[in-house]
Image (cartoon, rainbow, N blue to C red):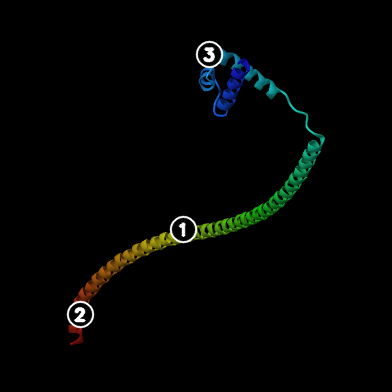
Amino acid sequence: MTSSVKDRVFAAAEQISAERRPTVSTVRATAGVSNADATRYLKEWSEEKLAAGGQVAATPPALLEQATRLAAACWADASTLASERHAAVETAWAQERKDKDLEIAELVADLDKAAAEKESAAAEHQARITALQSTAEALEQRLAALGTELEDTRAAERAAAGAAAEAEKKLASAEARSSTLEKVHNALLQRVAPEAKPSDV
């Protein structure tokens, strides 16, 4: 009777454990035993399961050898794949570095060219500024000289105008004197002429 109850409890626990963790109430209902029997034999079943799980069977030598060979083969394949991958990555990296170096060299060349063009343009611009400054200075000097000539011309014109005015004044005075002298001369002639007529008769 006791063995039959134990077997039913163990069978019920195995059946229930396939889906979930067996409990006293589930085992009691499945096995159709009392609560005390379910508690007692479920505890035994749990202890046997724990004991069985803690034991590790010795691995057969043939299986160990096969496992060692499999591990070595896997390691060799992994090493080969890793070496190939490393070589591919290193080749790609070398090519990428070569491309980057070429790109950098081209950028440096473009930068040097741009700097040279900028310096040339700046020098040309400075030369044009210097030429314009020289032309401006020459124009300023010419303008100053023309201003001086204009002042001299105006001064000469004023002097000529003054001399002309003085000459006109003198001419007017001379004409007045000439007119006066002519009148005096005519008057004298008139005075001398009547006295000369009787002696001529």
Residue furthest top in the image: 36
Q: Is residue 94 left or right of residue 139?
A: right
Q: Is residue 6 left or right of residue 160?
A: right
The circle on residue 86 is none
Quadrant placement of the N terminus: top right
Judge whether 183 appears above or below 119 on screen: below
In this image, 198 relative to 27: left or right? Answer: left
**Image x and y of residue 109, in percent:** 65, 56
Horizontal and vertical percent for residue 157? Answer: 37, 64
Q: Report the residue marked by disc 1.
A: 144
Residue 98: percent from the left, percent from the top? Answer: 69, 54
Which mark is first along the chain, 3 or 1?
A: 3
Viewer-nearest residue: 101 or 146: 101
What residue would you read off at disc 3? 35
The 10 Å Cα crowd at callout 3, few under 14, some 14 to 19, many 20 or more, is few
Q: Secondary structure at mark 3?
A: helix
Give the quarter of the figure containing the C terminus. Answer: bottom left
Point 57% across, 59% down: residue: 124
Please tell me how crowded label 1 is: few (under 14), some (14-19), or many (20+) other residues with Cα within 10 Å.
few
Amino acid at the residue labelled 3: Asn
* Label 2 neighbour load within 10 Å: few <14, some 14-19, many 20+: few
Q: Which residue is outermost to the bottom?
A: 201
